[in-house]
Image (cartoon, rainbow, N blue to C red):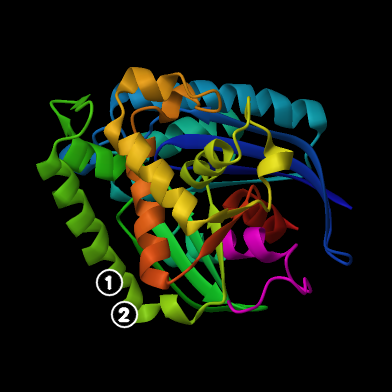
Amino acid sequence: MTRVAAVDCGTNSIRLLVADLDPATGELTELDRRMRIVRLGQGVDRTGRLAQEALERTFAACREYAEVIRELKAERTRFVATSASRDAENRAEFVRGIVEILGVEPEVISGDQEAEFSFTGATKELVGRDDLDRPYLVVDIGGGSTEFVVGDDHVRAARSVDIGCVRMTERHLAADGVVADPPSSGGLDAMRADIDAALDLAEEKVPLREAHTLVGLAGSVTTVAAIALGLPEYDSAAIHHARISLERVQEISDMLLASTHEQRATIPVMHPGRVDVIAAGALVLRRVMERAGAQEVVVSEHDILDGIAWSVA
């Protein structure tokens, strides 16, 4: 067994996994898994820079994580940064802060690398299941980007496109930093067109319609699943590997897009940091399922974070 720490720093959230891994058996024993909404990508699509307050939120979460990593005595740590820090002019300031706090340099990975980690994390447990046919289409809906990966035992094709829930919200549903409640019809039409254009790009490289099983990852997907399951509170065990129909995703997407901030905030499973971006995330999931011809999505709580951990081992 090797004890590792993996940190996934995305556009909307930063997450930590500390686990014991056995590469010989494929066994992962989770010791600590946690997430903080820090919105590192706040305004990046508009300004091209990481906002100072977003950096401070991220560094505060990293100080918490550093303490956990020390307490659990992880032998190796890998810190992966994704969409927001790829786009930012001032990413050197971000890198310096992470090195000072955690003692490791964040790796600003490409979209293709991000996709491969997501695929490994999401499918390692699925191989060999008789009820889920291959190839898999793994879709990771992040804050700044969405990754598409098709594969069976290994990745066959992957692409990252810029249709994350934060980016879509800021680009189409907000004015001067304030999200419209509910969105205007013009904003919704523009967002749908933007998503569909990005799906056209994804399909140039990834055969979305050839996959037999759609696997959905990250907070937008797991939150939609929790709503679909009618959970009184967020329950990872109930959500992991739940199968949610296209019809149910369409219903939930319509409901979220028609609701106000206050209405979305009262949903029991809704994390406060997702209230203003979940409608965009649900729409991305819906359009992906419709494009791929998927009648259901298999929801996974294991994703890029688990893939990062396996890459360390």
In this view, 305 is above or below 94: below
Residue 154 or residue 54, whichever sits in front: 154
> Residue 20, image x and y in percent?
83, 47
Q: Residue at x 34, y 71 (%)?
A: 202
| Picture residue at 54% right of the left edge, 52% below the top | 217
Q: Magenta residues?
A: 117-135
Assign the magenta stretch its main secondary structure: loop
Indicate whether 101 appears above or below 89: above
Q: Is residue 85 visible?
A: no
Res 298 → quadrant: bottom right
| Residue farthest to the left, as pictured | 186
**Distance of mark 1 from mark 2, alpha carbons?**
5 Å
At label 2, counting other C-alpha atoms closer than 10 Å, the crowd grade (few under 14, some 14-19, many 20 or more) is few
Tell me: 278 left or right of 171. Answer: right
Q: Position of residue 214 (x, y in %)?
A: 54, 66
Task: Give the percent coordinates (x, y) of residue 1.
Answer: 89, 53
**41 in relation to 261, above or below:** below
The count of marks equals 2
Query: Taking 262 as reference, is 98 left or right?
Result: right
Location of residue 13 with respect to 78 vertically, above or below:
above
Label 1 element class: helix
Q: Quadrant of the C terminus?
A: bottom right
Residue at x 47%, y 28% (from the top left corner): 37
**Type of the residue with mark 2:** Glu
Circle 2 residue: 204
* Residue 104 in view in this figure: yes
Q: Is residue 119 magenta?
A: yes
- Please name the amino acid that badge 1 sits on: Leu
Q: Which residue is mark 1?
A: 201
Cβ–Cβ below 8 Å for labels 1 and 2?
Answer: yes
Q: Nearer the viewer, residue 34 or 72?
A: 34
